[in-house]
Amino acid sequence: MYYSEDATQAQVAEELGMSRATVSRLLAEARAHGIVTIEVHRPTTFDASGLAGDLTQALGINRAWIGHGSSVVHAGRALAPQVGQALEAAELHFGDALLVSSGASVYEASRSEVPTLPGVVVAPTVGGMYEPDAYYQTNEIVRRMAMKVQGNAEFLYAPAMPGPELAPMLRNDPTIRRVTALWDTASVALLGIGAAPRLRTSLPSVISKDRNTMANSVGDICTRPFDRDGEPIVFPGMEDLVAMDFDQLRRVPHAIAIAAGADKVASIRAAAKASLFNELVTDAETAQALLEDA
């Protein structure tokens, strides 16, 4: 918790029901016994502007923001300054819609410092009521993000994959339609890009677990998997999926993807090829890998 989740010693003590002194002692013992090792590296210098320009051209997108990133801190937190810059550049005004997808990077970004955008409407791009993992609970991400930007939250009270009997009723529900209407009018969307299923430890429950179906998947966006050409992978039940479709993503003026890591290179390239996002926040290492891959 202390090293991987950036928790304070006081938070760890409270969570585990022990004293802060005990937490401090255990952390010290972990270092003494080699369970935890700490290394200090000289920061890598790079031309962020030049790298962003090269990446923009290579991916065929409108803009890129490059940060240092970190192998310890999650991308959503490590790249929070760049996410903030992307939001500021989008010039959102009172009443504009800011959509947020599910995913660990967007979830962590919602817990970080972002610009205040008073009066902006924050809404999800996908349902997710029955997801066990916090970073797939889109309403929770919306609530956090709305608090951070001082905006107004619009919640989607629908599972990402309702049954065939429930799906038509949800599509016609006024509260659901109020959110899904924003998918066609939103100014900005913050989007997580998932890695290929074989490289992940967890998946949204709605994505098919069938190996044959997902064999060609290199990633997903808004819980919609795609192949290396960015073409959607279809599996049973997708017709009932409560999530933005690819055509809607392509119409968002500022579709900002937040993604970093070697496991995301193929999915980022495929999503860019299909124009599923037009702006990217990533780190220098991933940017270099994308350029080499290109």
Image: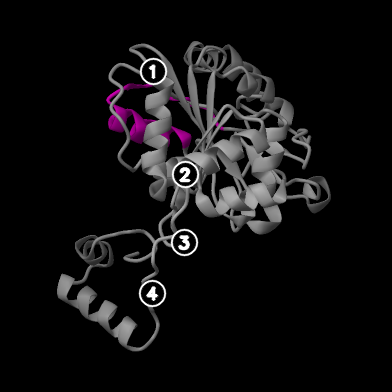
Q: Secondary structure beneath disc 4?
A: loop
Q: Where does residue 12 sit, x and y in percent of width and height?
A: 26, 64
Q: Amino acid at mark 2?
A: Ala
At a point 66% along the width and 31% down the height, the residue shown is 60
**Label 4: few (<14), some or many (≥20) within 10 Å?**
few
Q: Nearer the viewer, residue 15 or 28?
A: 28
What residue occupies the far bottom of the structure in this picture?
33
What residue is disc 3 on?
A: 71
Q: Relative to 80, is 286 above or below?
A: below
What residue is disc 4 on?
A: 39
Residue numbers of the magenta segment: 138-159
Along the polypeptide, which appears first: circle 3 or circle 2?
A: 2
Along the polypeptide, which appears first: circle 4 or circle 2?
A: 4
Q: Of tags 2 and 1, which is closer to the observer? A: 2
What residue is disc 2 on?
A: 48
Q: Amino acid at mark 1?
A: Leu
Q: CA distance from mark 1 to mark 4?
A: 41 Å
Q: CB of mark 3 within 8 Å of CB of mark 2?
A: no
What residue is disc 1 on?
A: 92
At a point 63% along the width and 53% down the height, the residue shown is 289
